[in-house]
Amino acid sequence: MNQARRGSVLNFTKMHGLGNDFVVVDAISQPFRLSTETIRELGNRNFGIGFDQLLVVEPPGLPDVDFRYRIFNSDGSEVEQCGNGARCFARFVRDQRLTNKKIIRVQTAKGVIELRVGKGGLITVDMGVPEMNPPAIPFAADRRKEVYTVEVAGQTVELTALSMGNPHGVLLVDDVDTAPVTELGPRLENHPRFPARANIGFLQILDRSHIRLRVFERGAGETLACGSGACAAVVAGRLRGLLDARVDVELRGGHLVVEWQGEGSPVMMEGTATSVFEGQVRLAGEAQPRRRKSPGKNARQGDGKPAQNRQQRSRQTAASRR
Ligand SMILES: N[C@H](CCC[C@H](N)C(=O)O)C(=O)O
């Protein structure tokens, strides 16, 4: 990847999948290399642009693959999989005329996934085959079980652990609205039995083909939706014999349809992808003007330091920002 000169301007597109929001960067036609610290700054909803994840589009690194895409949580950690991000990725590369294909193969840190652009803005993602063997999740356990008991916050909880390319723990709850997401989410995200941390799903089963779900995401906190979390929840429900193959998943930001035929099969996820606005951000390190201009010209962070990044949003649609 080319090194973006400090103080240079980065073009980006703000997108979301059911309110799980992303900054998407084309690193094919512009130089891009950001430090973890700069990614964190850009992800900050007060001092930066704000996002749950940053998605970076790169040229393919493998034959018979169209693109490579890298995924960074707002805490700066790079991860293997992002379901909502994959749909936004497919919309982005077509909107930006980087491809006109309707079936797009993309390499992630997890492997290669296939995206299909359908009618009415619906995009289907083959999220790959879920992995339940503890070492591959990774999850500390002496053998594979459908339900593990985990000691956390002075209590014993039951969860299903699996990988969708990224690690997930899924708990059954009676009602997502009263689920202990803020109490248990961060503690389980960082639990020692998840050595790479984990995304924690709180699953309410309405019937065999309808569920409600909230997800406390690794490296981002609770999001309005988590695509890989929706897939993990359906797999967990199926492993427990509680769900049919095709499930409507109601998340706080909207609905996904997830289908899994069972062990050894890939999980298919279908949903929308929304583009909100395009913008430019001037990366840290630009020469700050010496004399004070009007406040808008030389925004200052709360600690009195010159703002690290100034952004000029070139166009904002009517969609309200979360
Ligand atoms: N927080 C996740 C990455 C983003 C996943 C989520 N946004 C999705 O739609 O799958 C992780 O650290 O594995």
Image (cartoon, rainbow, N blue to C red):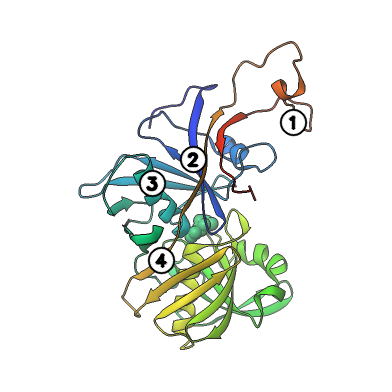
Where residue 33 appears, as percent x and y from the top left, is: 46, 32
**Front residue of this view, candidates 131 and 277:** 277
Where residue 128 appears, as percent x and y from the top left, is: 34, 65
Residue 69: mark in rendering: 3
Q: CA distance from mark 1 to mark 4?
A: 40 Å
Asked whether the viewer can see residue 161, the reply is no
Q: Nearer the viewer, mark 3 or mark 2?
A: 2
- The residue indicated by pointer 1 is 301
Q: Residue at x 69, y 27 (%)?
A: 307
Q: Earlier in the sequence, mark 3 or mark 1?
A: 3
Q: Secondary structure at mark 4?
A: strand
Where residue 141 appears, as percent x and y from the top left, is: 50, 75
Where residue 322 appears, as percent x and y from the top left, is: 65, 51
- The residue indicated by pointer 2 is 13
Q: CA distance from mark 2 to mark 4?
A: 22 Å
**Front residue of this view, candidates 162 and 9:** 9
Q: Amino acid at mark 3?
A: Tyr
**Front residue of this view, candidates 57 and 192:** 57
Q: Amino acid at mark 1?
A: Gln
Residue 270: mark in rendering: 4
Q: Earlier in the sequence, mark 2 or mark 4?
A: 2
| Ligand 1 within 8 Å, label 4 CB | no
Question: Do the CB atoms of the residues marked 3 and 2 lie less than 8 Å apart?
Answer: no
Q: Earlier in the sequence, mark 1 or mark 4?
A: 4
Q: Nearer the viewer, mark 1 or mark 2?
A: 2
Q: Earlier in the sequence, mark 1 or mark 2?
A: 2
Q: Which of the 4 quarters of the picture holds residue 93?
A: top left
